[in-house]
Amino acid sequence: MGINSTKLKPCLRLAVDWLFTILIGFLVVSYWRGTWTLFDIWLCNQPEDASLTAGNTFCLADLDLHRKSGWESYAIGMSLTILGIIAVWMGAWRPDVVIDNIKHEKITITPLKAAVRFLIVYTLGMAAVNLWRGVWYLTDTYLLPDRLQVHPEEGGAFPLASYWISSLFGSTLCFILFSGASLLAPPAIFLLDGPGVNPPPLAVTVMSSFYSLTLPAKKNPPDIPVNIMILDVLLSFVVVPIFVVMFWRGSWLVLDYYLWGFSLDPHKLHLSLLWNFLLAAGLMVITSDPAFNRISAIKWLHPEKCPLLPLKLLSRLRTYLLAWGTVNFWRVVWYIWDEFIGGTSLWSCLVSHIVPLILLASFGCLSCIVAPASTLGVDALCDPFAAEEPLFSNLPVPSLVLYFGAIFRQPIEIKEEQVLESFNAMKEFYVSSVVSSIQMRESIVDAPGEGSIQAADSKVHSPGEEDIESKSQQATASDEARLAQESLSKSWYIGGTGTSASYSSVRHSSAPRQFSSSMAFYLDMQRPDLDRRESSTGLGLSSRRSSVCSRSR
């Protein structure tokens, strides 16, 4: 299963996880930088000796070409996004299920299907880069380009108000639309390729993402009018990506101004990268899953002392800080390429574009190159019995979930003993952050004035789970602590992706999907992992969900 780090000591295992996290993040940024700069060269005739300190990178040498190439990139990005959405929604990712003469189901990823999967991810990745480049350059052109300019000593005039408004307006609108998690990018989040039957969350909408997290797995979504579905599509693939790019554009340029000042002195630019590195490291560590899941565990153990609203607000704050940490990380990697690895030459861009594709596909996370509008995240505390969101991981990425060449491999039937073995191997370190909370819970269970465990536990159940609730009410404090440890260890092993059932949702080939305007069909096109609500068959374990479930996206 994955990259074998189960035999390492807990601290070394965590170090391996962070190593892969940083490496994958570096490769994703490298791909984006190479692809973006290639279009700067092709659409803006940017010279190969362009440099940041000369002020002629990012198509800034000719403002008319800057605006024109922005429109061209946006058109390319939207066209490729539509093409990728159609491919995913029509089921091009998923293999057919073949039933032999004795009614045994067999799933095969043919070389053609593997190539189709690669092309889907590559198309959506190229779409995301072009769409971001277009929105970025058009925002440069039309958002207060001549107002409240500041004049650094050497670099000329720069509209600082435009930068701040872009950052604050973009992030605020994303959170208002419950899409703050869309601000994140690797190394803050990861999309994993497999190996499995279903795609990672590609070409998904706000509504489908929200329902996949907040509804129990066996509960059907409410009926939604067709016009609301159309609005959801426009919001997800047109509106939200614009706000996401506005945040990134504004935040990036704010960092440029305050840390570098657009100075002609390259030493000031290089010094700003050191500050970016420190900011990125600090923000990513304090907002990583080990730190934040401790708070989630306290909420699960002490529901009467942790109201839902503060936890939601804290989750949004975490997302916002992590987004700033991600922008700092990207700025470091991007400018290292521009300053130290071939500049903006054609060969440097091609290497930066091609090599990350090969390595990311090898690590099993090529899908990390996509971004809004090709994928997005929502702000929601998920239902304890929600269906898994397959092949998705938070920060840091557990090395165990990485499969070599996953996008090309056959689906794996994961045996229960394999899952439990990995869970136990990971438990020792990842549970340590909540042991003190568990012990505290045990010590106050019998204290006067405290609500019973049964009353607290009865709040965490889904409709139709009376047996589970009854057993939970009879649990002792030590049993609760043990279950909390197991739940957390499972949550940590899979990094928030769910259980091995994420790989096992397969539609019968004898029951092809029929077009419908129902919400269930609308969700099923985007997230086939949710088809277990209807007719499906499992290849692995039955669907389970960790009780500690408070992630975004």
Image: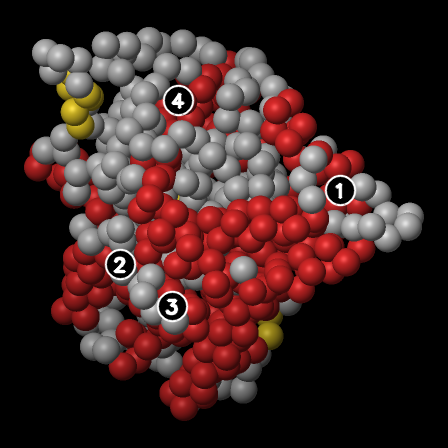
* Residue plotted at (14% across, 30% down): 108
Alpha carbon of mark 4 to alpha carbon of mark 1: how far?
Answer: 35 Å
| Residue behind mark 2 | 3
| Amino acid, disc 2 | Ile
Q: Are marks 2 and 4 in contact (CB under 8 Å)?
A: no
Where does label 1 land, which residue? 453
User: Is residue 368 shown left or right of residue 331?
Assistant: left
Circles 3 and 4, Cβ within 8 Å, touching? The answer is no
Q: Nearer the viewer, mark 4 or mark 1?
A: 1
| Front in this rendered view, residue 337 or 538 | 538
Percent x, y of residue 127: 31, 44
Residue type, mark 1 in image: Ile
Disc 3 marks which residue? 13
* Residue at image coords 55%, 32%: 385
Q: How far apart are marks 3 and 2 (CA)?
A: 11 Å
Q: In this view, does 339 lie above or below 43?
A: below
Q: Name the residue under label 4.
A: 531
Closer to viewer: mark 2 or mark 1: 1
Mark 2, Cα crowd under 10 Å, few <14 / some 14-19 / many 20+, is: few
Q: Is mark 2 on a helix, strand or loop?
A: loop
Hey, what amino acid is under mark 3?
Arg
CA gap between label 3 and label 1 equals 34 Å
* Residue 325 visible, this angle: no
> Does residue 433 show up?
yes
Quarter of the view holding residue 376: top left
Above or below residue 27? Residue 417 is above
**Quick one: which residue is furthest to the right in this view?**
449
